[in-house]
Amino acid sequence: MNIVTIVGARPQFIKAAAISRVLRSRHREVLVHTGQHYDPNMSAVFFDELGIPPPDVNLAVGSASHGAQTGAMLAKIEDVLLAERPDWVLVYGDTNSTLAGALAAAKLHIRVAHVEAGLRSFNRAMPEEINRIVTDHVSDLLLCPSQTAIDNLAREGITSGVALVGDVMADALRLAAERADHSTLETLGIQEGAYALATVHRAENTDEPGRLRGILSGLATLSIPVIFPVHPRARRAIAALGWTPPPQMRLIDPVGYLGMVALMRSARVILTDSGGIQKEAYWLGVPCVTLRDETEWVETVTCGWNTLVGADPERIAAAAHQPRPTTPRPPLYGDGFAAERCVTALETWNVERKRGSIER
Ligand code: UD1
Ligand code: UDP
């Protein structure tokens, strides 16, 4: 089969690293990078470290408002799809690149497979929630990481073309775990288990000065060093606030995945508004404090390893200082072999369709 894969943002490179290996062993993949993320430490570093084949096409769309960015991607992806006429378009997650890829393909009657389908925050103010809902509704194959995702789709009337495959980020973590770059801790002069790791990039936090101030104040009260790899969006927002970090907070540039895995694994606690990092914290057995009012990864909260605190400084500090959970940490979101199941689902879709079991 011919498959066009659309990626554009940091977490999509990491997810594609897991699937592309399996896909390319059996099929032809054309990798399209929209250019949504373009700084070397937001893009190239992941291709280099994770051995992702260089993009076959780079649309170099760059940053813009939602409409301008998604529209530019849509037009350029359409050109690629008209030239390639693939059997499938594969999209990941919930970014503007995901939405553009899915829409471009659906309008050309090319089948769409969505990795990380069915996730919902039930907060339509999040741009990602709109991207997820639209993408899921134009997808032919919905590759879900959890039963919750399948249930969410069923509530919206999507019950066929749905497969429970597990989470490809677990595959990515499994593949990277042995290669984690522990020299990152040495370079920063920090000790295992003696620091907090923080990340912030959601629009709801970076674009709301009140919330951003609340988060920064909460982080600033922690009694242990806080390592904070700063997403460019947050860097700009923090500069606009004119905020200066206290001495125990270290604002550093975004790090590569191998350095990030080392930083996550050895942290005492992780504070984040990232989707991916909430799961990685869980898999690595590090308590997570989520700087949001809701999460798509509800199971991590239910079992006591993730605490939702929003942007309130006192709740942030209280949650970060809590003792390590003693509740069990049952396996969630698959076994680290989701990529194989995703590719098999693509391969068997027609067969299944004839049987009528997953036809949409
Ligand atoms: C995007 C996704 C979000 C995902 C995140 C992963 C959307 C709507 N949002 O958010 O779901 O969780 O990626 O990190 O698709 N910038 C740079 N250099 C870069 C990239 C971005 O400086 O290489 C700056 C630009 O000022 C840009 C801003 O960051 O305007 C936001 O970038 P954008 O890709 O629009 O959204 P993210 O916040 O990265
Ligand atoms: N990540 C990274 N370096 C960093 C910050 C994050 O490698 O400096 C990784 C992180 O471990 C996870 C992914 O990037 O695998 C998550 O990306 P992000 O938080 O930007 O997006 P989200 O998952 O919220 O969509």
Image (tube, rainbow, N blue to C red):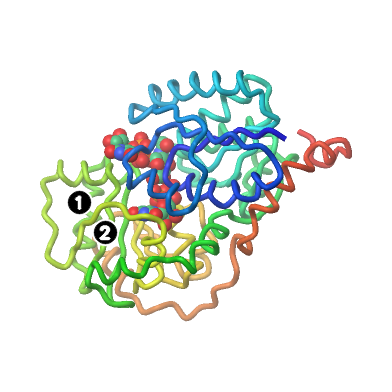
Relative to 229, say whether 192 is above or below: below
Q: Earlier in the sequence, mark 1 or mark 2?
A: 1
For mark 2, give the secondary structure: strand
Q: Is residue 251 visible?
A: yes
Residue displayed at 48% across by 46% down: 13
Where does ligand 1 appear, by image quarter?
Answer: top left
232 left or right of 353? left
Around disc 1, counting alpha carbons within 10 Å, would you say few (fewer than 14), some (14 to 19), or many (20 or more)? many
Residue displayed at 39% across by 43% down: 43
Identify residue type, mark 1.
Arg
Q: Is residue 294 visible?
A: no
Q: Nearer the viewer, residue 57 or 327?
A: 57
Is the residue marked 1 within 8 Å of ligand 1, measured from its CB? no
Residue under circle 2? 228
Disc assigned to residue 197:
none
Q: Quadrant of the N terminus?
A: top right
Q: Nearer the viewer, residue 201 or 315?
A: 201
Residue 247 lies in quadrant: bottom left
Q: Nearer the viewer, mark 1 or mark 2?
A: 2
Q: Quadrant of the C terminus?
A: top right
Identify residue type, mark 2.
Phe
For mark 1, give the secondary structure: helix
Residue displayed at 29% across by 63% down: 316
Residue displayed at 38% across by 59% down: 290
19 left or right of 70? right
Marks 1 and 2, Cα distance to the nearest angstrom? 15 Å
Q: Residue 354: where, in percent of width, then height?
A: 87, 35
Q: Residue 70: where, in percent of width, then height?
A: 44, 26
Q: Nearer the viewer, residue 315 or 107?
A: 107
Residue under circle 1? 213
Relative to 196, say whether 54 is above or below: above
